[in-house]
């Protein structure tokens, strides 16, 4: 596939937009360097990470769930070789763009992941959580966490082992409970996006594998039981309606690309928006779709941006673009991000920007029109 450079892509986007509509032609995607610097400081918190999945809190601030991350200080764009990496943490950003700190266990010198699968204590294999998405209700954070263990050869030999719902106290970030929702045999990686609409929480996931031509977007829903504080019975969209059988779940319609492992669905006025990066080796193209319902069908495919990192350095790749609609600004620019990583595991130590997310501003007009 031929990859377009960002400036060329933006020119093509504006040239193709709505004929002579001057206001649409003026819309461009830009890098938000200020938020990128705010989110990932050189000291005093998480200093390199992926994940970058945000939960809007009741007080208007946001918690960003990270995946693998480092907390050690960065000097001249570098970190100490061999510094310990942990698998999850939280980064707290206020509604008025102030860094409020990060949360993990242990100390800066000896950090530990904020939460760990119970199996980690008894299994001979190394177990960890990578984050899905979540929401706040009262004093509890409900976080879907994807469970993995090191079961294969080499640095990429991790194996999916199910999805847990972890309840975390929003005051002190202690883990209150862990419930396995799906085991490792489940073909859908649930919990990678959560959307509240009406009385339901819509819980999205991706289904992929050799038997599927491309990674599919699937959706379930559940109501929160106010008495128990737990999510009730799940229903699964089967292409026509809602079924109690998880095996009946169907791919959401209207999507002609392979959906990334992590993505975002949010509501903007009366429109539902899907933001996803195309899932493929070295693919950097980020798309949006819109729908009238949380389950699709999706339409109005828009190529918003192509990441430049994989073109500039063959060792780099980008993945899992995410949207953060709570940070839409006065100019109606949506805040999105994508993660950067390296096949060369030493590069993030020599240049921390090879393992830090990049934030962008996308005019909502490019998505909706």
Image (cartoon, grey):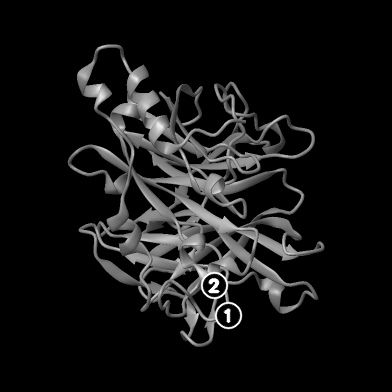
**Residue 127: percent from the left, percent from the top?**
70, 69
* 162 left or right of 289 in image: right
Q: Position of residue 272 (x, y in %)?
A: 39, 31
In the image as oriented, which residue stretches furthest toward the front? 312
Q: Is residue 34 left or right of residue 48?
A: left
> Residue 21 or 365: which is nearer the viewer?
21
- Secondary structure of residue under mark 1: loop
- Give percent across and percent down for residue 325: 33, 44
- Residue sitting at x 41%, y 31%: 8
Q: Is residue 43 visible?
A: yes
Name the quadrant containing residue 135: bottom left
User: In which quadrant will I find the N terminus?
Assistant: top right
Q: Which residue is mark 2?
A: 349
Q: Nearer the viewer, residue 66 or 228?
A: 66
Q: Count up the numbered dots.
A: 2
Q: Residue at x 55, y 74 (%)?
A: 113
Residue 228 visible somewhere in the drawing: no
Point 51% across, 22% down: residue: 297
Horizontal and vertical percent position of residue 282: 61, 43
Identify the mark at residue 81; answer none if there is no mark.
1
Q: Quadrant of the C terminus?
A: top left
Neighbor class of circle 2 (other Cα within 10 Å; few <14, some 14-19, many 20+) is: some
Image quadrant assignment for residue 159: bottom right
Q: Are marks 2 and 1 in contact (CB under 8 Å)?
A: yes
Q: In the image, is residue 146 above or below residue 10? A: below
Would you place residue 17 above or below residue 107 in this image?
above
């Amino acid at each position: 596939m031929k990859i377009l450079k960002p400036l060329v892509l933006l020119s093509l986007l504006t040239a193709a937009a709505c004929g002579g509509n001057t206001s649409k032609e003026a819309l461009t995607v830009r890098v938000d360097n200020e938020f990128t610097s705010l989110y990932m400081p050189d000291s005093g918190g998480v200093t390199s990470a992926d994940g970058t999945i945000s939960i809007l809190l009741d007080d208007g601030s946001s918690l960003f769930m990270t995946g693998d991350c480092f907390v050690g200080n960065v000097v001249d764009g570098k970190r100490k070789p061999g510094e310990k990496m942990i698998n999850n943490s939280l980064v707290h950003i206020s509604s008025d763009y102030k860094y409020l700190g990060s949360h993990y266990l242990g100390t800066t010198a000896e950090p530990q992941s904020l939460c760990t699968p119970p199996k980690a204590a008894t299994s001979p294999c190394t177990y960890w959580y990578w984050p899905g998405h979540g929401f706040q209700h009262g004093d509890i954070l409900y976080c879907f966490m994807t469970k993995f263990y090191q079961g294969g050869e080499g640095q990429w030999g991790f194996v999916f082992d199910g999805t847990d719902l972890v309840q975390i106290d929003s005051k002190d970030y202690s883990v209150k409970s862990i419930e396995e929702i799906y085991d490792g045999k489940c073909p859908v990686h649930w919990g990678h996006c959560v959307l509240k609409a009406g009385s339901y929480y819509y819980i999205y996931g991706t289904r992929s594998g050799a038997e599927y031509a491309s990674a599919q977007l699937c959706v379930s829903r559940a109501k929160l039981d106010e008495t128990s504080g737990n999510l009730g019975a799940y229903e699964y969209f089967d292409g026509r309606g809602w079924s109690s059988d998880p095996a009946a779940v169907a791919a959401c319609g209207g999507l002609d690309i392979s959906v990334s492992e992590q993505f975002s669905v949010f509501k903007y006025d009366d429109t539902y928006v899907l933001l996803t990066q195309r899932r493929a080796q070295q693919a950097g193209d980020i798309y949006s779709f819109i729908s009238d319902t949380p389950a699709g069908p999706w339409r109005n495919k828009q190529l918003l941006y192509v990441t430049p990192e994989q073109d500039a350095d063959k060792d780099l790749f980008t993945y899992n673009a995410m949207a953060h609609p709570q940070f839409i600004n006065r100019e109606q620019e949506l805040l999105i991000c994508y993660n950067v990583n390296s096949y060369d595991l030493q590069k993030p130590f020599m240049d921390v920007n090879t393992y830090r997310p990049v934030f962008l501003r996308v005019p909502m007009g490019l998505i909706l029109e």
